[in-house]
Each structure stands twice: as C-alpha cells, then as structure tokens.
Image (cartoon, grey):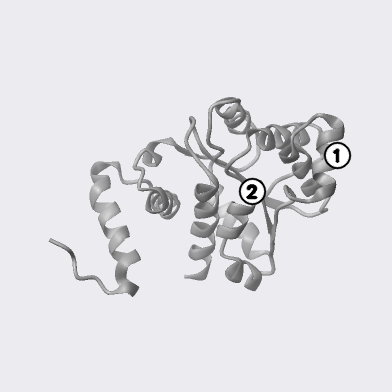
Amino acid sequence: MLENVRPMDIERRSFEIITELLGDRQPAPEIAPVVKRVIHTTADFDYAENLVFSPGAVERGMEALRAGCDIVTDTQMAKAGVNKTILARLGGEVHCFISDPDVAGEARDRGVTRAAVSMERAAALGKRCVFAIGNAPTALLALAELMDRGELDPALVIGVPVGFVNVVESKERILASAAPHIVARGRKGGSNVAAAICNALLYQIER
C-alpha cells in the first residue's frame, strides 16, 4: 500500500525508513548524519560499513566550513550538487577547475590527467579547503603527493571516487595519510556521494 506522505515530509520519512532498515547496524551518533545522507542519496546500505572516518573528521570538517572554508570538487556534477546557498552564508564557495581550458592544455602537455592538474590549482588558492573527490582517483593521488611535499594541508579530504583503475589504491593512500578524511573504502562512490557528504556537514551546521 502506498504511503500518503506530504511532499515536505518525504525526506523525513525516508530517513526514518533508513534508520529502521539499518537495524543493529546503526552508525555512531557523530557520523550518523553523513552515513544516512549517503544512503539516502544512493539507496545503498553498504555505505553503513564502507565509509571510513578519521578521528573527529566530521567535527573538523564542520569547523572548517563554519570558518568560511571553500570546497574543491573534481567534477562539475559534484559542484552542482553542493548546497552553495548554505556555503555562501558561511563565507565559502565551491571550486572546480576540471573544465578550465588552461587546465586541459597543461594536462595534455605534461601527459597527466586534468584532475591532477586541478588539485595543483586548488593548492595554489592559498587557503585551506575541503576536497570532495567523487570521480578521479588521480585527484586523490595528486592530493597525497602534494601533502607529502608539504604543499597542501587540507581541512578535510572526502575520498569517494568510483571505478576500477587505481580507485582502491588511491583511497588507501588517503586512509594512510594524516589528513582528516572521510573515505568510501573499496570501489563504490561517485560525485553524488561526494556532494551528499558535503551537504550532510552543511545541513548539520544549519540546524
């Protein structure tokens, strides 16, 4: 039987159903809003197990965003999915350099990916950022190399690229790093997941 749910109550009811279906797999309170937002976005309950949080990652990410931190994404899709209205109220903005013609040109000349060059451009912004990576493992690898060289100090790395080539390995690099991180271990992820995690942090701040 169809539930008679008013449009404004659909999201609330969805989260109630997610909580019910999680059963004894309820995430810890400090990470629950992120985990449930990702499940709400994907209808994939595997994220109850494969999302890995460094200690204090959620609170550190929220603190950075409250202080006006910017968000850098690796795709225009992830950028489009982030709630820019809330972010702007906090003093931040979203950057995505992947489609910039000069980024494409430099990537071609150097024989590297646009995603890797995009991370270098982000490092040159001169401010700490939250990095939300949902598509390109080379973006995560570039972030790891920039951090190893002391050229980047991310406020938070959201590492959720999806796929098969270098995806698992790139995530493991971030998991082994000292940077605050939220990582979807394994092959699952996507730009929608990256945006959902950003929004989960932003919505908690707005409560």
Which element is circle 1 on?
helix
Q: Dividing the picture into quarters, in which one does residue 4 lie?
A: bottom left
Closer to the camera, 139 or 86? 139
Count neighbours of disc 1 (C-alpha within 10 A) and say few if under 14, some if 14 to 19, many if 20 or more. some
Of callouts 2 and 1, the N-terminal one: 2
Q: CA distance from mark 2 to mark 1?
A: 18 Å
Q: Position of residue 89 (x, y in %)?
A: 63, 73
- Please identify the quarter of the rendering in which residue 65 is found: bottom right
Between residue 62 and residue 81, name the one nearer to us. 81
Quarter of the figure with the N terminus: bottom left
Marks 2 and 1 close (CB-CB < 8 Å): no
| Place of residue 36 in the rendered image (x, y in percent of width and height, measured from the top left) | 38, 52
Residue 170 makes an appearance in the image: yes
Instruction: Please name the residue shown 80% across and 42% down the image.
Output: 104
Residue furthest left in the image: 1
Q: Percent x, y for residue 37?
A: 42, 54
The residue that mark 2 highlights is: 75
**Residue 169: x percent and y percent?**
59, 25
Residue at 83% x, 53% y is 126
Q: Which numbered circle lies on residue 106?
A: 1
| 17 to the left or right of 85 | left
Q: Amino acid at mark 2?
A: Thr
Question: In the shown orientation, is residue 173 left or right of residue 36?
Answer: right
Secondary-structure class at tag 2 = loop
Vertical comparison of 27 with 49: above or below: below
